């Protein structure tokens, strides 16, 4: 099979899963491995079925209704609920974009000795140009290619000395510590793994795919016919995408555990520090792989986050919203994308160390996730909205269980913070 043919067989589920390993995620996984070694590897295995179930719900909502998640909320729920969900989504995305831009610039600076703020501005302009100027079909291929570039993190794990016995044990035997640092890291890891921006992105990309294939004229124009074959492709694509995402996070944690934690470097404050520590511990090759991986991850994830915000705002106010049309036909939609990146650039003026910003944006994701998990599960189980394509009992159990788990983790963290 030609590479181009392989990319054609990857759908929105793969892009969504790959974008989950953004620089915020990478920074969180590195911090996890550095701080706790292999002890939180079980999260990759534990989160995979729940992550798959939630993203399948989001994709199915878009596929079946012909509407993105924000439009479905607007048409079926009260305005305060809609505005609250959209507001927290956009704020979190913008902070994430800012932290990702910073991590990309800092990682590039390790290889190319150019002033940090110049790289930050250039990275922002490049990202905006790629989103605004590339045609939708080309843009999709670009995102899929960047997703595959994350395989560098799998390669990096085999350049360091890994205690595979301990890694396997930690994967299948969950370990838990009742202290604030462990709980905070747990929330952060789940926050970057179950990321709210992915909910809006995948639901809208399923609609974009139907528009691109001529199955519907545009979002909300009609309720499309949905076949079992389309649902099967959605599910298999989502399973593969979420599996890919968790494999990448698994190997990032392993690499950090085997190199940084094993050498006593348990507190990583920046991308430059992580790379500088990895260079003498694991060699130039691993150093380059990590640096390139962070930049590739940002180029993939930032367009997805900015696009997610634009879909959310456009859906909330009933605007036309599609990547299939050029900028001059979708000024408000692309305007949100540009504004998200521009404001994200200025987030860096707060002068928080980049990995700290990444880490706490991940925690913020963990805080808002339960709200959106509740909304998504409720929509996907609503026969009025989904007709015969509602959740199975198992999917309902998984959706509500994940929502409860995230709430309990937050309550535990608040309780421990008071002690």
Image: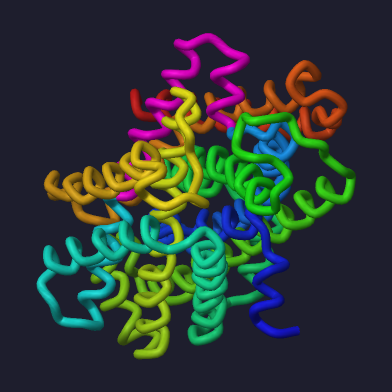
Q: Is residue 179 visible?
A: no
Q: Image quadrant for the N terminus?
A: bottom right
Residue at 32 percent across and 68 percent down: it is 265
How far across and down, in percent of the image, does residue 240 sit? 71, 60
Q: Is residue 251 visible?
A: yes
Q: Nearer the viewer, residue 14 or 30?
A: 14
Looking at the image, how many numbered discs can be counted on the residues?
0
Q: Quadrant of residue 250?
A: bottom right
Q: Quadrant of residue 303?
A: bottom left
How far across and down, in percent of the image, does residue 135 sit? 48, 61
Q: Quadrant of residue 169?
A: bottom right
Q: Is residue 40 above or below residue 80?
A: below
| Start-end of magenta stretch | 69-97
Q: Is residue 83 above or below residue 13?
A: above
Q: Is residue 57 above or below residue 137?
A: above
Residue at 36 percent across and 69 percent down: it is 295
Residue at 68 percent across and 69 percent down: it is 8
- Please tell me whether residue 314 belongs to the stretch shown in magenta: no
How far across and down, in percent of the image, does residue 259 sit? 42, 76
Q: Main secondary structure of the magenta part?
A: helix
Residue 258 as seen in the image, left or right of residue 216 = left
- Please tell me whether residue 77 belongs to the stretch shown in magenta: yes
Residue at 55 percent across and 84 percent down: it is 158
Residue 104 as seen in the image, left or right of residue 376 = left
How far across and down, in percent of the image, does residue 88 sit? 39, 28
Q: Image quadrant for the C terminus?
A: top left
């Amino acid at each position: 099979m030609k590479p181009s043919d392989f990319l054609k067989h990857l759908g929105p589920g793969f892009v969504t899963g790959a974008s989950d390993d953004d620089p915020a995620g990478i920074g969180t996984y590195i911090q996890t491995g550095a701080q706790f070694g292999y002890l939180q590897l079980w999260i990759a295995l534990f989160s995979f079925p729940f992550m798959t179930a939630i993203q399948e719900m989001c994709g199915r909502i878009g596929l079946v209704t012909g509407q993105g998640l924000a439009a479905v909320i607007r048409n079926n729920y009260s305005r305060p609920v809609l505005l609250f969900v959209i507001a927290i989504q956009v704020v979190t995305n913008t902070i994430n974009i800012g932290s990702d831009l910073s991590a990309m610039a800092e990682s590039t600076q390790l290889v190319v000795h150019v002033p940090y703020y110049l790289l930050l501005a250039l990275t922002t302009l490049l990202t905006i140009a790629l989103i605004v100027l590339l045609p939708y079909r080309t843009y999709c291929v670009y995102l899929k290619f960047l997703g595959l570039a994350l395989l560098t993190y799998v390669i990096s794990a085999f350049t360091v000395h890994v205690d595979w016995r301990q890694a396997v044990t930690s994967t299948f035997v969950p370990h838990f510590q009742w202290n604030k640092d462990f709980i905070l890291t747990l929330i952060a890891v789940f926050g970057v793994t179950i990321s709210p921006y992915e909910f809006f992105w995948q639901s809208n990309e399923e609609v974009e795919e139907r528009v691109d294939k001529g199955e519907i004229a545009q979002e909300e124009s009609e309720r499309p016919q949905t076949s079992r074959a389309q649902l099967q492709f959605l599910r298999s694509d989502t399973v593969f995408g979420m599996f890919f995402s968790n494999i990448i996070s698994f190997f990032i944690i392993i690499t950090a555990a085997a190199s940084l934690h094993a050498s006593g470097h348990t507190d990583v404050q920046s991308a430059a520090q992580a790379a500088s520590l990895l260079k003498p511990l694991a060699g130039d090759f691993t150093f380059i792989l990590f640096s390139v991986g962070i930049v590739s991850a940002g180029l993939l994830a930032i367009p997805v986050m900015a696009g997610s915000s634009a879909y959310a705002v456009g859906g909330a106010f009933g605007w036309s919203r599609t990547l299939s049309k050029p900028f001059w036909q979708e000024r408000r939609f692309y305007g949100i994308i540009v504004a998200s990146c521009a404001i994200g650039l200025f987030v860096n003026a707060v002068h928080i160390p980049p990995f700290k910003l990444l880490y706490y944006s991940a925690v913020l994701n963990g805080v808002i996730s339960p709200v959106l998990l509740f909304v998504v599960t409720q929509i996907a189980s609503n026969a009025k909205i989904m007709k015969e394509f509602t959740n199975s009992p198992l999917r309902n159990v998984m959706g509500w269980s994940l929502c409860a788990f995230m709430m309990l983790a937050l309550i535990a963290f608040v309780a421990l913070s008071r002690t």
